[in-house]
Amino acid sequence: MTTLDTKRSDAPECTHTRTRPSLATMPLRIAKTVVDYANTPHLDSSTTTYMQAHRNLVAQAHTCRALRQPAQTCVQQWLVIERCDVTTEHKVHGTESDINTTESDINTAEPNIIETERWLSNMDAIVATNAFNHVREVVIATSSRLANPQEITDALRHLRVDQHTWPHVTTLRISNHSAPTDAGRTGDEGCAELAAELRSCFPAVSHLWADEGPHGRSMLGAYVTTALGQLTRISMRYASIPGFSIKTLPSHITHLSLRACGRRSYLQMPQITAPPLVALTLSVVPLSYAWDQFTNGDSSMGPGIEFTCLERLELTFFVPSRSVPGGRADDAWEYSDGYPEQSPQRKTVAVRERASMYTVLRARGARFPQLRHVTLHQYPGRVADFLRSVPVGQLETVHVTANVTAFKGLRLGKLRALHTCELMVSGEARRAEQPHGQRLVMRALAQDAHVRSLSIRVPDTLRIHLPSLHTVR
């Protein structure tokens, strides 16, 4: 993979400095940015160990005085209740510190605990520092196996969470990892009791983030049903909202992220009111998708779908696969991930329809008057065709991952407000596609100076020849 990253700056060069920059002289806003950059990406990971992230923040607080305040602020924002693997804990535990490092071992909450697992929490640290007003987010996580709802309810009660007031907790993060062996477990026992406990302890939650793994059934059904009236932000990974018997989401939801469990699973979701949405993330989007699950909620707005307030749109597409007789196939490339299972006489390919056949996401005249940020993953058509449906003159960031032919006809010059652009050519490109890749790079490099950050990644097989930046224009 060849990567080209360019950043432009019009700031004058500094010719004289009186103070040598160091961590000790770092401005607070810069220190906060450093801490956020080091920790925030881990929050959305499906393999996060939250207590380890908590310890990392504590360690950063002791790196230097400049990092102490922002790191300590981040530490105090979480209440973590996590079931960890003991083997892993022995490897990573032992951070020496004097701020917010007290951890609760709450194994007594689970009488039949597996010997290789234990529950941990930073609850004791919060109580010791009386930091209840600082906590903004509650994290309930498991590391290896699907949790029974009763286990989590017992943990909350053992910590006496309900005996304290959490006035500023607005985010509930459930990371309930599961394994294939959990597929037969229903997880229904105690769901209503857990929902009541969560609602009682954290009544101000308005943002639900859930990653429950592709195996087993969700334990959040009862909670979502009862809390839906006050949720404004929902982020679901693997968990299926239709499984909660919810046919229509309320119109006060402004941020929505629904992620399916793989290429074989088509996106399923209830009816959604489009105008209030500010940020929308969808995967895995079928090729024939046409905003069928969206409504304006007001018949006076006309037949088209009006995303009146939408500023951020992220779409990951589902490209179906099928088996064809061994040999060559037009407009196809091989999958390398091993499924569907192959036979010696057949090879598995993903078929790309020609761009002129695509109507994906363009039916019903969806409109995006406020759109500023677009991210497309594995877009199967022409990116230029998709951008015709949006006000390109106001786009500020564009991130696209697609096959090289999807970039045909793309002209970034029309994106006058664009300041950040990331283009990634995925898959193994054929030799015949090399000219397309070369033109993509040349056109991207020839953009006006308003593009502040440009990143282009192409497969090594394209053999792109990079010109001198002084000769691009």
Image (cartoon, rainbow, N blue to C red):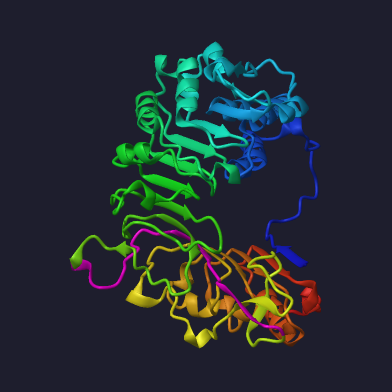
Residue 445 x/y as whole percent: 69, 74
Would residue 446 be seen by someone viewing this image from the given angle?
Answer: no
- Identity of the residue furthest to the left in this view: 300
- Identity of the residue furthest to the top in this view: 128
Residue 102 x/y as whole percent: 63, 16
Specify whether residue 74 is painted magenta: no
Would residue 297 be seen by someone viewing this image from the given angle?
Answer: yes
Specify whether residue 324 is painted magenta: yes
Residue depicted at 76% across the width and 66% down the height: 3
Residue depicted at 45% across the width and 76% down the height: 360
Q: Is residue 259 left or right of residue 305?
A: right
Work out whether residue 438 or residue 143 is closer to the camera in this orientation and state it.
Answer: 143
Quadrant in the picture for the C terminus: bottom right
Q: Is residue 37 left or right of residue 357?
A: right
Relative height, residue 135 to residue 462 (above, below)? above
Q: How many marks?
A: 0
Residue span colored magenta: 300-326
Residue 357 x/y as whole percent: 48, 86
Residue depicted at 71% across the width and 77% down the height: 441
Q: Is residue 4 left or right of residue 238?
A: right
Residue 138 x/y as whole percent: 49, 30
Relative height, residue 292 to residue 157 (above, below)? below
Quadrant in the picture for the N terminus: bottom right
